[in-house]
Image (cartoon, rainbow, N blue to C red):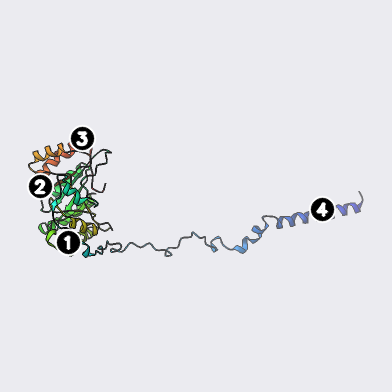
């Protein structure tokens, strides 16, 4: 091979080598490779999700946040309503039915979906509340308690403890209208209701409020219902009231078991004794004990 040919091949080899090297530095990945040093350390440009300890602090709600406000009620709307009392319950008289129609009043919660009973208790004088709560807890039963304004007056030492326990154990607390509603002004009526609501707020750290009102024993009036509803309550009556000895109570409650029945009870010794037998017996027959909220 001539020397000139060798020189030509050498030049061609050099040219090809230069072309290959230049392609390597201008190919698809060359920009990344050449620019890596200029980007600096990987942490120089923080990501959008990088944590910022104080950017959005999470604060606990203030103790008064969301406290339920007293409803703004126009008292003049009650002046022309009848304050005449009618038998609140135990028999469905036409007169009583006429008073409670088109209102929130209810005396049963039957839905024909099972055997649900609703035990309700009046808290006025201190008796066997703690023991009744023990019985309910031991059987997983729930109930609704209606507290009167006199309960804490008659039971100042342990009354609030009982009310707090009622709430903490999953029962419902409502207002008992034991005051003389027929002889007081609408303003005073609302004051009495809200006094109990404020106590409820003191006992809880949430924004819920009591939602049930039960009138004075066996009495109800058109005005009472309207005032209670304006203050944000539903009026809870009952399907049956029970009294007497524990043996009589046990018999009567057993004979009146039906879906949706609302039993009105006190917290006496005889009621407590009857419940120790009635609750497990009824549960054994498929009965569930619920609050009025359930």
Disc 3 residue crowd, few under 14, some 14–19, many 20+, Cα 10 Å: few
Q: Which residue is mark 2?
A: 268
| Residue 124 locus on image (x, y percent) | 12, 54
Disc 2 residue crowd, few under 14, some 14–19, many 20+, Cα 10 Å: some
Q: Are marks 1 and 2 in contact (CB under 8 Å)?
A: no
Query: Element under label 1?
Result: helix
Q: Are marks 2 and 3 in contact (CB under 8 Å)?
A: no
Label 3 – label 1 distance at C-alpha = 43 Å
Q: Which residue is mark 4?
A: 13
Up the image or down, 186 lies above or below 146; here it is: below
Q: Which numbered dot is residue 189?
A: 1
Q: Quadrant of residue 28?
A: bottom right
**Mark 2, mark 4: which one is toward the viewer?**
2
Up the image or down, 193 lies above or below 142; here it is: below
Label 1 – label 2 distance at C-alpha = 28 Å
Q: Which residue is mark 3?
A: 284
Label whose residue precedes the other's in the sequence (2 or 3): 2
């Amino acid at each position: 091979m001539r020397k000139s040919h060798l020189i030509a091949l050498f030049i061609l080899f050099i040219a090809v080598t230069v072309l290959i090297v230049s392609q390597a530095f201008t190919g698809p990945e060359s920009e990344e490779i050449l620019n890596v040093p200029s980007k600096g350390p990987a942490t120089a440009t923080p990501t959008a999700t990088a944590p910022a300890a104080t950017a959005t602090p999470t604060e606990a709600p203030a103790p008064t946040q969301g406290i339920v406000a007293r409803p703004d009620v126009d008292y003049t709307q009650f002046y022309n309503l009848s304050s005449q009392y009618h038998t609140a319950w135990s028999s469905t008289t036409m007169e009583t039915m006429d008073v409670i129609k088109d209102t929130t009043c209810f005396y049963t919660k039957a839905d024909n979906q099972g055997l649900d009973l609703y035990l309700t208790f009046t808290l006025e004088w201190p008796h066997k509340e703690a023991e009744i709560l023990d019985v309910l807890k031991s059987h997983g039963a729930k109930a609704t308690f209606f507290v009167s304004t006199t309960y804490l007056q008659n039971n100042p030492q342990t009354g609030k403890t009982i009310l707090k326990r009622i709430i903490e154990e999953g029962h419902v607390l409502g207002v008992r209208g034991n005051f003389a509603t027929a002889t007081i002004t609408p303003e005073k009526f609302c004051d009495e209701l809200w006094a109990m609501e404020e106590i409820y707020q003191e006992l809880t750290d949430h924004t819920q409020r009591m939602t049930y009102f039960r009138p004075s024993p066996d009495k109800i009036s058109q005005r009472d219902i309207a005032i209670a509803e304006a203050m944000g309550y539903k009026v809870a009556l009952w399907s049956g009231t029970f009294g007497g000895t524990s043996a009589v109570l046990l018999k009567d409650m057993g004979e009146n078991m039906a879906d949706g029945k609302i039993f009105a009870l006190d917290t006496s010794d005889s009621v407590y004794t009857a419940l120790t037998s009635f609750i497990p017996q009824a549960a054994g027959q498929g009965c569930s004990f619920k609050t009025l909220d359930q």
